[in-house]
Image (cartoon, coloured by chain):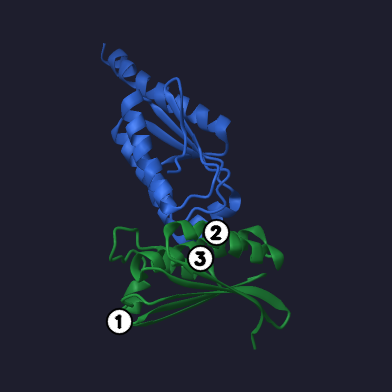
Chain colours: A blue, B green
Amino acid sequence: MDRIPILRMGQYLLVTIQIDLYDRLATNLESDLVQAVSKTGARGVLIDISALSIVDSFMGRILNNIGSMSKIMDAETVVVGMQPAVAITLIELGLELKGVHTALNVEKGMELLAAKINSAYEDPDEDEAGTE
Amino acid sequence: MKLVLNKDKMQIIREQDVVPFRNRVKEYATKIGMGIVNQTKLITAASELVRNMLKYGGGGEALIEVISQGRDNGIRLTFTDKGPGITDIPLAMKDGYTTGKSLGVGLPGARRLVNEFDIKSTPGSGTTVCIIKWKNG
């Protein structure tokens, strides 16, 4: 069966969706990704959707689910590369991608993930410093 | 007065039929010179409706037509299934209402994305949804 490849790079998982997805493929990606987060202990997930010509309510729900599930597994998710027409359509459709972070491109997405992960590490230190 | 310039029929029986159908709609929309934003809206609406047809109607038939009215060209899509039908259409058209596990934005969202939206259903014998997106709509 078709599968979307998940690449591991350090503490990140990278997914580039290069083909238009039918529903089963999207659901498979959701479960594969959550399992990959658990197996690798990844702290960040980056999903590139620049090749997707549409994101409908089903795909939107899958992206939100991936974000929420990864969050529970202690990983941040960022969706990058959304085409402008897709953003316009998503909002008119009535869908907001609230469960995930978004960034304009892969580079900005990686920066965002790095910042999120580092701040999560640094925060407790700062609190300790404050109480001392 | 709407004139039909071209028509094409596709059977949608399995999930895998959805992607070729979306591509076919895109081909026709590109052919009449529809802009990328309107194309995306049309294909997204089509994707929602075709999913409903598969999920609730057990599959059916999608008709793609290139139509013209006055100086405007557009795409008309008609989805026909022989499923159980919808008993309460106003309720089904409400945002957030679903009988499945979805978000309940499919039908009302699809209506917002197109210029004309018509739904007819007879409980027990099936549902027909017809949408039109004008090239410059």
Instruction: Give the residue displayed 52% in from the left and 32% down from the top.
Output: A109
User: Which residue is depicted at the point 47% across and 35% down?
Assistant: A5
Q: x and y percent of residue B84 in the render?
A: 31, 76
Give the label, 1 or 3, closer to the camera. 1
* Quadrant where the image shows the C terminus of chain A: top left
Label 2 vs label 1: CA separation? 29 Å
Q: Are marks 1 and 3 on the same chain?
A: yes
Residue that badge 3 annotates: B46
Label drawn at residue B124: 1
In the displayed structure image, the side of residue B86 where residue B44 appears, left or right:
right
- Give the alpha-carbon distance from disc 2 to disc 3, as whole Å: 12 Å
Residue A99, visible in the rendered structure: no
Q: Secondary structure at mark 2?
A: helix
| Front position in the image: B57 or A79 | B57
Q: The disc labelled 2 sits on which kind of residue?
A: Pro
State if disc 3 and disc 1 touch (CB < 8 Å): no
* Amino acid of disc 1: Gly
Location of residue A57 by image quarter = bottom left
Query: The N terminus of chain A appears in which quarter of the rendering?
Result: top left
What residue is pinned by disc 2? Answer: B20
Q: Position of residue B98 (x, y in %)?
A: 30, 65
Kindly check if marks 2 and 3 are in contact, taking CB atoms under 8 A apart as contact. Answer: no
Picture layout, residue A100 above or below residue A21: above
